[in-house]
Amino acid sequence: CINQQDVEEKNIQVPLMTDIYSRAAFVVTYMGPEEPDNKEGFALLERLKEFYNRRRSDTALGSLVLHDYRLEDLGLPPSDDPSWASLRKILLRPWSSRVWIVQNFVVNEINYLVCGRTSMTLWENPLSCHLCDS
């Protein structure tokens, strides 16, 4: 653990995290305690994961730009669906503002998100896939 109140310690430890996360078999990110609408947000995240995996496997759709389509036409809920607000609440928790959390997703391909008793495996790291494809 890194003492969040000690700037000097953070300046030393955070740069080491890339090496640590890249060598880990997998990374577990604890996002905090469960809230009543977490399940809706995680269900949407699971749908987005499926959407991403389907599109990634189809090279013709690989460059799909979401704003060119209605979400419903893509099999996703409309933008005013409560699940989007639930997902937004999950993603805006304090864990997401920490630099090394972003490093988790960039340097390790196997990521688990845990929020209270709810958990899921994230997709293969989309950033590394795009980097490998170019």
Image (spheres, rainbow, N blue to C red):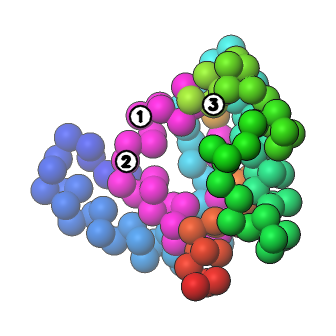
Crowd tier of the residue under label 3, counting other residues whose Cα lies within 10 Å: few below 14, some 14–19, many 20 or above:
some
Residue 98's label in the rendered image is 2
Q: Secondary structure at mark 3?
A: helix
Q: Secondary structure at mark 2?
A: loop
Residue 125 sits in which quadrant? bottom right
* 2 or 3: tag closer to the N-terminus: 3
The residue that label 3 is drawn on is: 87
Query: Residue 52's spot in the image, x, y percent?
Result: 76, 56
CA gap between label 1 and label 2 equals 7 Å
The residue that label 1 is drawn on is: 94
104 within the magenta span: yes
Amino acid at the residue labelled 1: Pro
Query: Residue 55's spot in the image, x, y percent?
Result: 80, 61
Residue 83's label in the rendered image is none
1 or 3: mark nearer the eye: 3
Crowd tier of the residue under label 1, counting other residues whose Cα lies within 10 Å: few below 14, some 14–19, many 20 or above:
few
* 1 or 3: tag closer to the N-terminus: 3
Asked if marks 1 and 2 touch (Cβ < 8 Å), the reply is: yes
Amino acid at the residue labelled 2: Arg
Q: Looking at the image, is 57 positioned above or below residue 101? A: below
Numbered label tally: 3
Q: Which residues are magenta?
A: 89-114
Residue 126 sits in which quadrant? bottom right
2 or 3: mark nearer the eye: 3
